[in-house]
Image (cartoon, rainbow, N blue to C red):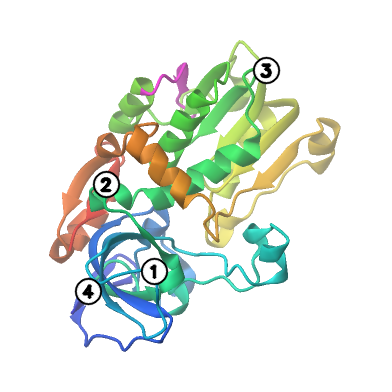
Amino acid sequence: MKVAYRQGRQIQIRQEPPRALAPDQIRVRVLACGICGTDLHDNPAEADRAQPFGHEIAGTVAELGAAVSGLTVGQPVVLESATPCGRCAACRNTRQELCADIQSFFFTGSFGFAEEVVVPAICALPCADLPPEVACLSEPLGVAIDLVRLADIQPTSNVLLLGPGPIGLMALALTRRLGARRVFLSAFARETVRCAAARALGVDRIVDPSATPLATCDFGCPIDRVLVTTPPTTLNDAFEVACKGAIISFIGIGHGESAFCRFDANAFHFKKLQLRASFASPALYTPMALDYLREGVVNGPALISHRFPLDRLAEAMATARDTAHALKVVVQP
């Protein structure tokens, strides 16, 4: 089978023999795998070795491990990139987000930019009523759901969203659904396709931080909620623009120096700010995400700007980096 490896920005497609299944695993034929922003990161810690990647996966069950029940060969499924075990103390105390024994294909080394993946059966959810390229969006949508949940958005909230990527736009749609009073977006004007998508979702105003620093921007109202999908270095902008008592939720990831944020803790304290990290692993909202895609709460097809076969993965990655023209890029082996 074909398996893609990434080393820096170099992509290799290799031929590998199928893996054997453990009793609690399944083999899935990959029909769609989305390119996540983390797939595009240049991580210096991974520069010395090629690795398989891709975690936004939908496909069909090709084979069942000996102990697997509740699934059938040929069944369409979508995969959670990480699933709570349901057995540890945290899970049994309704704190699945703190699961001590997460089940994930990240631990099997089998990833979605391939013709097949071997995954824990518990990670698979049946999904026969959505096209696979739409169903695979449930993974990043679950991240957006968690980001918005942590921000505790109210009908009186004035929300600033940093970053117009797919997760940011999904969060914008959810924020609008919650009835926030006003919603603003920080995005570069050159990100034309993404800004157009934000306008279609009803954003009140888009601010280009390269033209107008957020700390100097007059929004006409206090910003009491900030959703950050950009690297940690932008948290200072969130702290500056947030009003007293504001909540900031964030998912941004950086590597090297961009992983750090230096800020005035006294000012943070006196403004009574709250910073809430959204790390949606294990996934908790996949059924909800699939329902939102079915109901059009998030318009999945409208988010997909490009589709590529696996053999053109290098081109797909380059396209995903072109934020002026690309929104969500999906690979269909």
Q: Which residue is mark 4?
A: 12
Q: Which residue is mark 2?
A: 130
Asked whether the beta carbons under mark 2 and mark 3 sit within 8 Å of each other, the answer is no
Please name the residue shown 25% across and 50% down the image.
133
Please name the residue shown 52% across and 57% down the image.
283
Report the Cα–Cα distance between label 3 and label 1.
50 Å
Magenta highlight on residue 302: no
Position of residue 59 measured from the top left corner of the image (x, y, whole percent): 26, 62
Report the Cα–Cα distance between label 2 and label 1.
20 Å
- Answer with mark 3 or mark 1, whichever residue precedes in sequence: 1
Report the Cα–Cα distance between label 4 and label 3.
49 Å
Circle 1 or circle 4, nearest the eye: 1
Label ID, residue 222: 3
Query: Is disc 3 placed on a helix, strand or loop?
Result: loop
Front residue of this view, candidates 220 and 169: 169
Looking at the image, residue 252 lies above or below residue 248: below
Question: Identity of the amino acid at label 3?
Answer: Pro
- Answer with mark 4 or mark 2, whichever residue precedes in sequence: 4
Question: Identity of the amino acid at label 1?
Answer: Gly
- Alpha-carbon neighbours of circle 3 within 10 Å: few (<14), some, or many (≥20)? some
Q: Which residue is mark 1?
A: 70
